[in-house]
Amino acid sequence: MAKRRPRILTLSAKEHLILELLVEQEEMYGLQLVAASRRRLKRGTIYVTLGRMEDKGYIESRLEDAPPNAGGLPRRLYQPTALGRRVLNAWFAAAKHLMPEFAR
Amino acid sequence: MIHATQRLRTLAAHMVSERTMERVIDPLLTDAQLEYEAARRQGRRWRSRWTLIAGGLTFLKTLTLCVAHRVVVGDRVRTMDDGAALKRTAWISFAAMLLATAWLMYPPLARQMRQRGIVLQHPEILLTLVPQALSLAIPIGVTFGVLIGMRGRTISTRVWWSVAAYAVACSLAGLATLVWLRPAANQAFREVAFEAGFNVSRAERPLIEKGLTELTLGELRQRMAMARSDGSGSSTDVRFALFYHQIWALSFASLVLALFGLSFSRQLASRWTSVLFSIGTIVCYYVLLWVGQATSLRHVIPAGSGAWLPNLVFAIVAAAVFISKSRSREMSSANGREA
């Protein structure tokens, strides 16, 4: 039987930005991330990206406790997982190694 | 706003998976709704209107991305299995088209061989027999491919769209064959057969008048107009009209038969059942084609209805099976929720 190769963990520019913001703020919802990114993240793609990051295991989400009289669904809040923090740290380490400007 | 959110949610639920609803669509709609409510509470009218528009556009863009991802990549499970089934469908379809083309070419070929041995003198005549056979072989191949290739499978959205796209491509190929290739090839056959039969060169050959199957669409429409205007008789008019509509109907037969095949494929567990069902489908289609033709020529039904009769019957049956399956799926999921 062929040996299974481990899955290579990837981090796109948007995923990197989201992880950075979440590590800073700990827990945010989708539009909060869009506002905090100063237009680098778009409303139309943020939720798809967050869903993909959750599938990859970089972030996890929970439903906010909605006030008793509120109608509609509760808000979904996102926070980084331990894996997500490790991937972000690994990215920074690689960046420092490859591009000395980051080391300053 | 809550009602609008519910409506958008209901729309999205028909198009994406439950997981996508939970992880992507619901958070999007919730954030948009809460943003709108916050703007209304603060008395910011223009801000609240902007959030409505931005929320709607965000929903549309996100839904488009999710649906496109689902169609192209598919749901997370079964992707490799779906790919194998689609490849199998394509190969079986191609093999069936080849066999059907050879089988349909055989009668005119055998006739020519018996009568004058033209094929030995002009082997290129074989190519002129291909389009005539191909126009029927394409829908036959698609039917066999879908019914045998997809037998016993639950059809996922990705597979459904892939087969539909393949059937549309085959329909377009059939249309091109019937509209351009067949008339030109049939006329070329007649000319080569005449030259060989009467031992004349191309320069000496007189102009050979085109028969019904040698007319292009434009020429057919002209003959139909002429038959109507000079009072050649309603029979001639019906013949031309029937042939004209049959060109279009036969072109779309691939799409109709593919959708028919998808609606029945799950019930066909064994290979031989699916082969027999495919043969039965082709025979039924041919019988309906003949019935439509005969009733049109006898002026019982219009020529267009006669030509499209087999497609209509198969499309209605496929739709009925699909609706009945959707309803039984909804009932069983409702029973599951109650339990």
Image (tube, coloured by chain):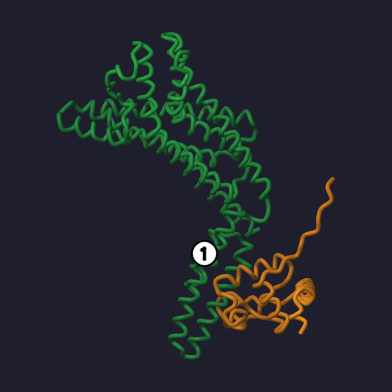
Chain colours: A orange, B green
Outermost residue, bottom direction?
A: B42
| Residue at the spot 27% in from the left edge and 33% down from the top edge | B219
Residue closer to the observer: A74 or B228: B228
Left or right relative to B84: residue A99: right
User: What residue does disc 1 label?
Assistant: B10
Q: Residue at x 46, y 15 (%)?
A: B119
| Residue B198 versus residue B253 in the image, above or below | above
* Residue at the far top in the pictured view: B115
Residue at the spot x=59%, y=79% of the render? A34
Q: Judge left or right: residue B196 versus residue B254.
A: left
Amino acid at pointer 1 = Thr
User: Residue B166 at x, y = what percent?
Assistant: 52, 43
Q: In the displayed image of the protein, which residue is found farthest to the left?
A: B230
Label 1's element? helix
Q: Position of residue A100 (x, y in %)?
A: 76, 79
The subunit letter for the residue under badge 1 reads B
Q: Residue B20 location in percent, x, y?
A: 61, 63
Q: Nearer the viewer, residue A101 or B298?
A: A101
Identity of the residue drawn at 68% across and 53% down: B77
**10 Å neighbourhood of mark 1: few (<14), some, or many (≥20)?**
few
Position above or below: B326 against B51: above
